[in-house]
Amino acid sequence: MKDKIEEFQKTKDFLVCVDSDGCAMDTMDVKHEEAFGPEAVNTWDLHHIKDRFLKVWNDINLYTKTRGINRFKGVVTTFAALEAEGIEMPDISSFKKWTETTNELSNPSLERAIAETNDEQLKKALDWSHAVNRTIEEKLAGNDKPVEGAKEGLEAANNVANVAIVSSANGAAVLDEWTRHDLAVHVDVMLGQEAGTKAYCIQEMKKFGFDDTHVLMVGDAPGDLDAAHKNGVLYYPILVGKEKFSWDRFREEALGKFIDGSFAGEYQQKLINEFNDNLK
């Protein structure tokens, strides 16, 4: 599987970019409930506020407008929300600064920053991120499955368009999941967090000669919509709690509109309004 932008070869006039966790793979809830949140409690020793921490963590990462936020920004946002409630939280100021200044929110980028600064807060954040990856690998293998309807949707898309995975998840985990569940056969290039932000990946993919109206981002989170907006391309939402309906509608209705040029404008706006209303 090609996992670098420069390895991609354009074979169609249209491009469909697809997010992974919570969009094509039904992995988002279980990863946050079993790995991300609990490992943060362990790493920063938050057992005394565990229930409240996990509730706020899940709200921020799964059920509100910040759904799908990068893991490192998720930590910063959750800590800030709890501090705003008057709860005393560990100092993560230098880690927060890294999340605001790095051009790549990934483990390798964090490792490079640690090599330069030897900062203890950064080391702790990396320990947490590694622990999350280990837990996902050890405990959740076999718990992952594609979202119902996603496989058929991807196959339909790949018949008329090039398909790129554009995900902020760990690239190796995405490759493993998509290969095991036979989704990878409908994909031309796989871009995980190591390839850069979603907005950057779409921007670079456009350089292969795709018109803005010939690029569609399929995602389940506001970050996916934002990445599409930044690049002036189209957006199709997978609605939380209505994933099968969303993929069926994509295959039966939206994909045709995308190809025939009637997607932009009124139809897309209706979908985006629905998407925003669906996230509290």
Image: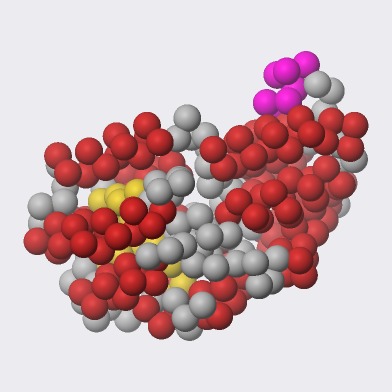
Where residue 46 appears, as percent x and y from the top left, is: 86, 36
List x then y, in percent, for residue 193.
56, 61
Please say if 137 is above or below 41.
below
Q: Position of residue 55 (x, y in %)?
A: 70, 34
Q: Residue at x 37, y 32 (%)?
A: 277
Residue 101, compared with residue 251, is above or below; it is: above
> Magenta segment range?
80-86
Measuring 38% from the left and 57% from the top, which residue is drawn there?
Answer: 244
Please, which residue is most extreme toward the top here?
Answer: 86
Q: Quarter of the image holding residue 56?
A: top right
Q: How many marks?
A: 0
Q: Is residue 82 magenta?
A: yes
Q: Is residue 155 left or right of residue 53?
A: left
Q: Main secondary structure of the magenta part?
A: helix
| Residue 79 visible | yes
Residue at x 81% of width, y 21% of height:
87
User: In which quarter of the view is residue 62 placed?
Assistant: top right
x and y percentages locating residue 148 in the rendered image: 43, 63
Along the line of sight, which residue is nearer the eye, 91 or 275?
A: 275
